[in-house]
Image (tube, helix red, strand yellow):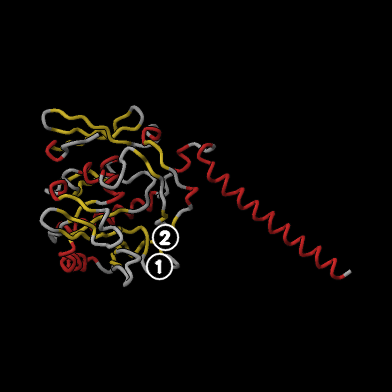
Amino acid sequence: MLKRMKKMCDLRHILVLNFLCLLINLFFAVMQLNHGFWPPETFYQPVLTPKDRELMRKTLEVFVGALEAGNITYMMYGGTLIGSYRHHGLIPWDDDTDFILNSTQIDDFKKAIEPLGPEFQLYESDALRTTGWKFYSKAAGKFTHRSFKWPYIDIFFFEENQTHIWDENPQYKSEFCFQKTDVFPLQKRPFEGMTLNAPCKTYEVLSTNYDIHMCASRSFSHINELPLFTFSQKSVPCKILEDKFPFVKRTCSNGIVTENLNVAEWTLQTFQLPESCQSSYP
């Protein structure tokens, strides 16, 4: 009798476990299919509050001001460069900023921002280089599992030879490598109401690693410092989002590229730059 009851209990446990596994598999299957059920903009919701955005901009102004005063070579990088080229500011659903500096100027860079403390702080990369350098305000929010704060500026460094520059981080150096003729001389581009350094041929540099016509949702939450599940990520042609968010449209005439920041049928702002730094553009 006891053996029979034990077998029944074991069978019940097996059935419960199988049922739970079925539910979990069903959940992930639905998540993988959700792209067909949920509108694209569901994956592209802005995550910054007005207060977050204000602190991020203030931090950026202070950071860039110190770099320019110290004659530090810097430029927008990664998602921030995409944002400048495509939106004249942050990618609307992004939550951090990225800049790359010359690795030969690290000591000069540290001296340039030292007077900004204690209101602003620098986090240097850990020994294993699992986390990069960060610059942030003392007023930023704390992490429970990190010693730096958010919102922060992600800082990268490049190395160079006579013909190329590349990200000095071993994880990125083979993929993020650019011809110097595409990068220099640096030009000013709009970003959140400021004009900041960017590669001369921004489109060529971006095209090395990104399809600028495709809009990818976030894959990492910098707010929580955690990766996002793959089923919460999406990539769609940017045209699908043009009625929802501002995008830049370009025309060229008499050696001048005119960039109009449009949302739907409205023009929000216009920026012009020489065609010599835009040898090819979409």
- The residue positioned 11% from the left and 38% from the top of the image is 276
> Hey, what amino acid is under mark 1?
Arg
User: Where does residue 127 sit, x and y in percent of width and height?
Assistant: 31, 72
Count of numbered tags: 2
Q: Is residue 162 above or below residue 194?
A: below
Q: Is residue 282 above or below residue 195?
A: above
| Neighbourhood count class around disc 1 (C-alpha, 10 Å): few under 14, some 14–19, many 20 upward | few
User: Where does residue 185 sit, x and y in percent of width and height?
Assistant: 11, 48
Q: CA distance from mark 1 to mark 2?
A: 8 Å
Q: Is residue 191 above or below residue 130?
A: above
User: Where does residue 179 sit, x and y in percent of width and height?
Assistant: 16, 49
Q: Is residue 91 above or below residue 160?
A: above
Q: Which residue is mark 1?
A: 146
> Hey, what amino acid is under mark 2?
Glu
Please tell me whether mark 2 sits on a helix, a strand or a loop. loop
| Disc 1 and disc 2 in contact, CB within 8 angstroms | yes
Q: Which residue is mark 2?
A: 225
User: Where does residue 45 sit, x and y in percent of width and height?
Assistant: 44, 44
Instruction: Point out the image quarter for the C terminus.
Output: top left
Image check: 29 left or right of 255? right
Please tell me whether mark 1 sits on a helix, a strand or a loop. loop
- The residue positioned 33% from the left and 59% from the top of the image is 152
Chain-order first, disc 1 or disc 2: 1
